[in-house]
């Protein structure tokens, strides 16, 4: 069984201040409750330029309803996928897209569980955590659950050559992936107050995709 010792977030790092509002009781994503779509006049429709190997059409549209309204109807392009580009975190960083552009990370593990993260910034190698309070984690288990920012810390996204991390606190990451993208893990974390995204705390990746705006 793969075992990984995850690094702890450096509380002394200068982190960006999130611009979103923390999730509270009764709001979408609180305590991992089944996510209710935000009340929008025009629901955000997630438009992918090519079919996804991770999510079905129904799941894509369910997830689209939880993206920021300003992203409605904009086409998302496949920047990186393991089936085409191989399993490499370094390659993922190189294919990350335009600086400042949002990113959608989709994962399917070897037990057919689908989950991932929405980042308001390009997934990239960094010295510290980056992102805003619009960042969130999600899981289809089998129904969609969305885990939004709690406001407890700003550990949104951090990438180095050995590890990609989303959400953190007390040495536990909401989602992490190793350098070869074959293995990862998910733990409840303070940033999103999430449940474990996969069926197990550590998982093996079957397919992984990163989508971004052109």
Image (cartoon, helix red, strand yellow):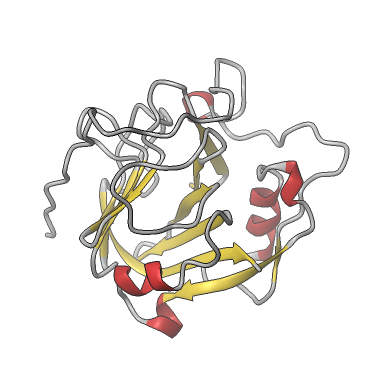
Seen from the viewer's position, the closer of residues 32 and 90 is: 90
**Quarter of the figure that contains the C terminus:** bottom right
Spot the residue most to the top.
25
Spot the residue most to the bottom.
84
Task: Classify 214 as above or below 17.
Answer: below
Find residue 167 and report its horizontal and vertical position in percent: 37, 38
Q: How many numbered tags mark residues here?
A: 0
Residue 55 visible in the snapshot: no
Task: Classify 42 as above or below 17.
Answer: below
Residue at x-position 50% and y-position 30%: 18
Residue at x-position 58% and y-position 56%: 101
Where residue 24 sits, quadrant-wise, is: top right
Residue at x-position 54% and y-position 57%: 104
User: In this rendering, would 202 be left or right of 69?
Assistant: left
Seen from the viewer's position, the closer of residues 34 and 50 is: 50
Residue 64 visible in the snapshot: yes
**Quarter of the figure that contains the N terminus:** bottom left
Find residue 4 and report its horizontal and vertical position in percent: 13, 52
User: In this rendering, would 180 be left or right of 66?
Assistant: left
User: In this rendering, would 197 be left or right of 42?
Assistant: left
Where residue 75 sits, quadrant-wise, is: bottom right
Residue at x-position 71% and y-position 45%: 65
Task: Classify 72 as above or below 168.
Answer: below
Where residue 206 sits, quadrant-wise, is: bottom left
Find residue 78 and report its horizontal and vertical position in percent: 57, 73
Find residue 40 and report its horizontal and vertical position in percent: 82, 35
């Amino acid at each position: 069984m793969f075992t990984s010792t995850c690094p702890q977030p450096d509380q002394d790092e200068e982190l960006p201040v999130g611009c979103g509002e923390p999730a509270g009781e009764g709001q979408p994503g609180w305590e991992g409750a089944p996510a209710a779509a935000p009340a929008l006049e025009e629901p955000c429709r997630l438009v992918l330029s090519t079919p996804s190997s991770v999510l079905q059409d129904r799941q894509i549209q369910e997830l689209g309803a939880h993206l920021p309204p300003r992203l409605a109807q904009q086409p998302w392009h496949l920047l990186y996928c393991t089936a085409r580009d191989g399993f490499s975190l370094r390659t993922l960083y190189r294919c990350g897209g335009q600086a400042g552009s949002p990113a959608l990370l989709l994962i399917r593990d070897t037990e057919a569980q689908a989950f991932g993260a929405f980042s308001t910034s390009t997934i990239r190698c960094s010295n510290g955590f980056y992102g805003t309070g619009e960042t969130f984690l999600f899981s289809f288990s089998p129904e969609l659950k969305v885990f939004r920012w709690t406001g407890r810390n700003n550990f949104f996204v951090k990438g180095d050559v050995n590890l990609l991390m989303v959400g953190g606190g007390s040495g536990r990451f909401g989602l992490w992936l190793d350098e070869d993208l074959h293995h990862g893990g998910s733990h409840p974390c303070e940033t999103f107050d999430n449940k474990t995204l996969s069926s197990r705390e550590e998982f093996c990746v079957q397919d992984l995709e990163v989508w971004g705006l052109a």
